[in-house]
Image (tube, helix red, strand yellow):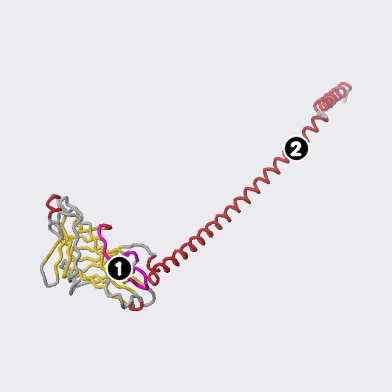
Amino acid sequence: MDRNQIIGILLIAAILIGYMVFTAPSKEEIEAARQEQLRQDSISKVEEEIAKQKALELSTLENDSVSRDQFIANDSTIADSMRQDQLIEKFASFGESAIGENKFVTIENDLLKLTISTKGGRPYSVQLKNYQTHDSLPLVLFNGDENEFGMTFFAENRKISTNEFFFEPMGSSSSIVANKSKESLSLRLRAGEGKYIEYTYTIVPGSYLLDFDIHFVGMDQLISKNNSYIDLNWYVNMPGLEKGKTWENQYSGIFYKHFQDEVDWLTETSASDKESISTKVKWIAFKQQFFSSIILPRMYF
């Protein structure tokens, strides 16, 4: 190595050393960098703590949600239990039947279709299959709340109206059709073990007549022997079926036949006409211009 090379190497080394000296951070810069690192470390720790806290809150929220659902369920159960106790207090043996879900079952033949509501066990609607209204709609004699049918009596010193209670259909089918022979549909209003009121609807092919039987089973333990009668309530808000409303209204009304006597009626043109009948009645009918709904007991009312 000659002298010039040595001088060149020394110059390069001097330049590098000078560069390192001039570019080296000062004490202030080193302290500032240290503080910045501490700040970054602190931020990281804070972010980590926040993440842990969020995870904990989420877990707590999920647990609270489960607890809240359990509380609501428990609260609902308590409310249902209290309500059931209140209904039992109000209706005695019939109390449990005051809770339920309204469902519909049908029984029909080739001429008519009867829809029955399990609330009250009553006829909900009656459709005549071979007829239509003036505007070509299915002809329904009555439907829904336009019709009320039920019994009222006293049991265990409480007033019982069957329309307020839920009946249980007997049998697995919710739709019964009488194609070749008669068919029956029974529903029971339960009032404890071995005690119930049973409605039985029976229909035969090719007939507009519908048999309706009422059976009281075990009710002698609940209904006082001094109670000599039971009220049968039947209300119909007759829908318009004909195009000529004037004539339809004029020929619509309530008709009834006195036992072993003549037919009588309430004035068709008066909505406030009333009659209190103290004698026996053979049948009662809601008559419209061309169609009638009649209740005809085997003996009399």
Where's residue 73, x and y in %? 50, 60
From the viewer's perspective, is residue 127 above or below residue 159?
above
Which is more N-terminal, label 1 or label 2?
Answer: 2
The one of 232 and 175 positioned closer to us in this rendering: 232
Where's residue 47, x and y in %? 67, 43
Segment tinted magenta in the rendering: 146-165
Q: Among all residues in the image, which is located at the extreme top?
A: 4
Count up the numbered dots.
Answer: 2
- Amino acid type at mark 2: Gln
Where's residue 64, x and y in %? 57, 55
Q: Which mark is residue 152?
A: 1
Where's residue 88, x and y in %? 42, 69
- Amino acid type at mark 1: Thr
Q: Which residue is mark 2?
A: 37
- Where is residue 14, by image quadrant? top right
- Dot 2 alpha-carbon crowd within 10 angstroms: few under 14, some 14 to 19, many 20 or more: few
Residue 157 forms part of the magenta stretch = yes
Secondary structure that dominates the magenta span:
strand
